[in-house]
Image: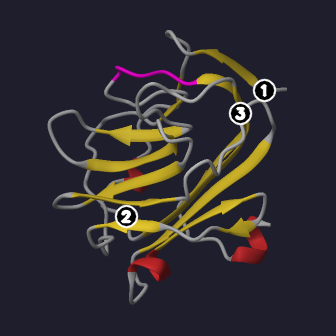
Amino acid sequence: MSLDLDGVDDQVNHGDIAGFDGAAAFTGMCWANIDAVPTAETAYLAKVVAATPYVFLFGPTTTNTVTVLLSAAGNTSGTTPASSQTNGVWEHWAFVYDGTGAANADRLKIYKNGVNQTLTFVGTIPATVADGGTEPIYAGRDSRGSVFLNGRVAFVKLWTVALTAAEVA
C-alpha cells in the first residue's frame, strides 16, 4: 500500500523524532513514483525548521534530480545527476548520512534501486546536523509547509544509524 499524494496539501506528519536532532548518522529510504517534475524543491522525507537550517530534506528537485540537504551552520547538499529520477516509475531511493566520514562522498550517499549514485556536493557535509527542536518529520512535503509532493511513496523508513550499502540494497 502506498500514500497517494496530490501535490496540493497531502502529507504525513510523523511527529518530532528527537533522535535526528544534532545527529551524526542516520538513514532514510522509500519507494517513490512521482507524477511530474516538481515546480519547487519538495521532499519524500523532511525535518526543516523555518527560522534555522535544515536538519534534513530528502526528495526530488526541479531538475528531476534527487537531493539531500543537511545543515549544522549552513545549507549543504548532495544531488544526483540531472534526470536521474524517472517520473511514473516506481524507484527505491535511500540516503545514508554518516558524519564520521573523511570527505563529502564518505558522509553522504544516495542510492537509486540499490546503486550508489555519483553526487554533486555544495559545501562541506557537516559532522552533525542542526537541532530541529520540536519540528516534526514529514513525508510528502517540505516541512516549511510550502511545497507538497505529487506522486506516491511507500515503505517510508528512517533509522538513527548509517546503514551499509548491503543493508540499503
* Three-letter amino acid code of the residue under disc 1: Ser
On-image quarter of the N terminus:
top right
**Percent position (x, y) of residue 84?**
64, 51
The residue indicated by pointer 3 is 87
Q: Quadrant of residue 46?
A: top left
* Three-letter amino acid code of the residue under disc 3: Asn
On screen, 123 above or below 164? above
How many numbered marks, from 0 up? 3
Outermost residue to the right: 1
Foreground of the two, 132 or 57: 57
Residues at discs 3 and 2 in contact (Cβ within 8 Å): no
**Percent position (x, y) of residue 23?**
37, 64
Look at the image and give the residue range highlighted in magenta: 145-149
Closer to viewer: mark 1 or mark 3: 3
Q: At 57% across and 71% down in the image, what residue appears?
A: 118
Task: Report whether 77 appears left or right of 59.
Answer: left
Q: Which mark is residue 2?
A: 1
